Each structure stands twice: as C-alpha cells, then as structure tokens.
Amino acid sequence: MNAIRWLFSLIFIIQMYVMMAVVSVLFFPWALLSREGAFAACHFYARWVIVTARILCGIRTEVRGEVPQDEVIVAAKHQSFFDIIVIFAALPRPKFIMKRELIYTPFLGQYALRIGCIPVDRGKRGAAIAKMKADVQKGLAEPGQLVIYPQGTRVAPGVVKPYKAGPGLLYQQLEQPCVPVATNIGLFWPKRSILRKPGLAVVEFLPRIGTGLPMQEFLSRVETEIETRSNRLMAEAGFVAEPVAESKRPPG
C-alpha cells in the first residue's frame, strides 16, 4: 500500500510542476497586460493542485472560519507548500512576504511579483517592511491580503520554533487588523518527502485581531492562538507527539 501511495505521490508531484509551466505559459499574455490575469492564473493553478491532490493522493481539504475579503494581515502557520496553495485559493487577492531567492524560480517567481508579493532578504526584513509602508502611504501598493509566516519558514508538526517580530512590525506600521491562520496540513504533505498521506487537511481562519494592541501583546496573542488551534487540528487528525525543538531534532 505504501509503495502504491508513493507512486501516486510521485505522479502527483510531476504533474503539479508540469501544470505550473503549462498554466504560466497559457496565461502569460493576460498576466502581462493585467494583474487580474496573474491572479486568475494563480487561482486556477491553486485549485488544480487541490483537486489533483484529492484524486491522486486522497488529501481532502477544508477551509474553516471567516475568510477575509478586505485589506488585512494574514499571519499563518506554515507546515508545507500545500498550505500556501490552500490559503491562496481561499483569499481573493493574496500577496505574500517571500524569500528573495524565490523570485528567480521559473514561472513561480515572475507570477509572485506580478500579483504583488514582497521579496525580502534574510535578516533585512525591517527595511522591506519600511519600504512597503512607504508604498502604501503613497498609494502605490496594490490592495489585498498580505500573508506572512510568523515563524519565517516551514515548521514540521510537533516541532517548536520561535515566532519572529515581523508580523508585529507590520501590524504596527500598516495599522491593519490581523487574521491568524492555523493548519494541520503538514501531517499529510510532509516537509522534504515525496509521500503524500490521505486525510482531511484543514486551514482555519481564526477571529481577527483588531488594531491598536501593544506589539508584545499582539505577538503573544498571535502565537498562542495559532499554536493552540493548530495543535487541536492536528489532534483532530490523530497526531499525538511531544513537541521537539527544531534545533534538537535528530538528523535526517
């Protein structure tokens, strides 16, 4: 059974990247002329991945909570590439804080820039956030939902990794409400693994946090709400494990 799942997982991964190239090329003229074309391409692709993950790998998806339609900061738990896909499909105009090196990824990088994603250098996020605030104030930034990953990278289920200050800086500087997002997706789409596991992958939009909180109170609330709900979603899926600090994980 595992061999069959591994084979179908491999087929899924191959077709996923082939389809990324196909969609990118087909939508390119529209995306070049209009940002709406870029969003249409990315939403089509996200939905394609969700459907084929269910057909080939048995991964069903569910989006819970109230999906924001206005301009907000979305602070999301990040366990795998698939939570990016599901969040993107759910939001009307998402844009992500992303690692600068990703803009050089074929197709992905070009479309990410077209929809308004913000590339930042590792260790230089403060400068990027300051520039973004200036763009918003000048009316240059496109409206939408700004998605940031508070832990800065993918974190496997059960691994403890501290939250960074980036969401707090955005929250203070942009003066926008924040919607925390919890997930259990890493249980079914593991980090650094070909095998995809069947089950119900959930992304849950939690109640928004209004503006005006002190930074430390805001950061504490974001971390508590995301981690508490993510742990409950993982327990709901049958995951039981003692948290392991990322720095102490065994090799491999």
Image (spheres, rainbow, N blue to C red):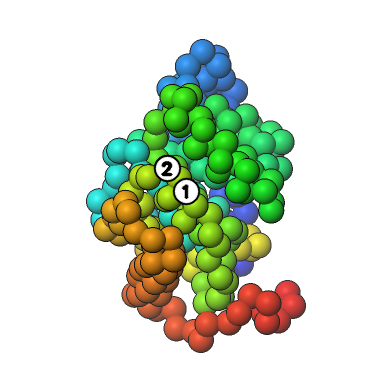
Between residue 222 and residue 13, name the one nearer to us: 222
Between residue 32 and residue 52, name the one nearer to us: 32
Q: Is residue 30 left or right of residue 109?
A: left
Q: Where's the C terminus, which quadrant?
A: bottom right
Q: Is residue 145 left or right of residue 169?
A: left
The spot of residue 199 in percent (x, y) is: 40, 65
Residue at image coords 43%, 50%: 172
Judge whether 25 appears above or below 75 on screen. above
Q: Is residue 120 left or right of residue 142?
A: right
Q: Is residue 79 left or right of residue 51?
A: right
Judge whether 7 appears above or below 173 on screen. below
Q: Are marks 1 and 2 in contact (CB under 8 Å)?
A: yes
**Any part of residue 236 in sight:** yes
The spot of residue 54 in percent (x, y) is: 42, 53
> How far apart in space, not on screen, are marks 1 and 2 (Cα)?
6 Å
Q: Which residue is mark 1?
A: 170
The spot of residue 231 in percent (x, y) is: 40, 74
Residue 174: mark in rendering: 2
Q: Where's the N terminus, which quadrant?
A: bottom right
Q: Amino acid at mark 2?
A: Leu
Residue 70: mark in rendering: none
Residue at image coords 43%, 39%: 94
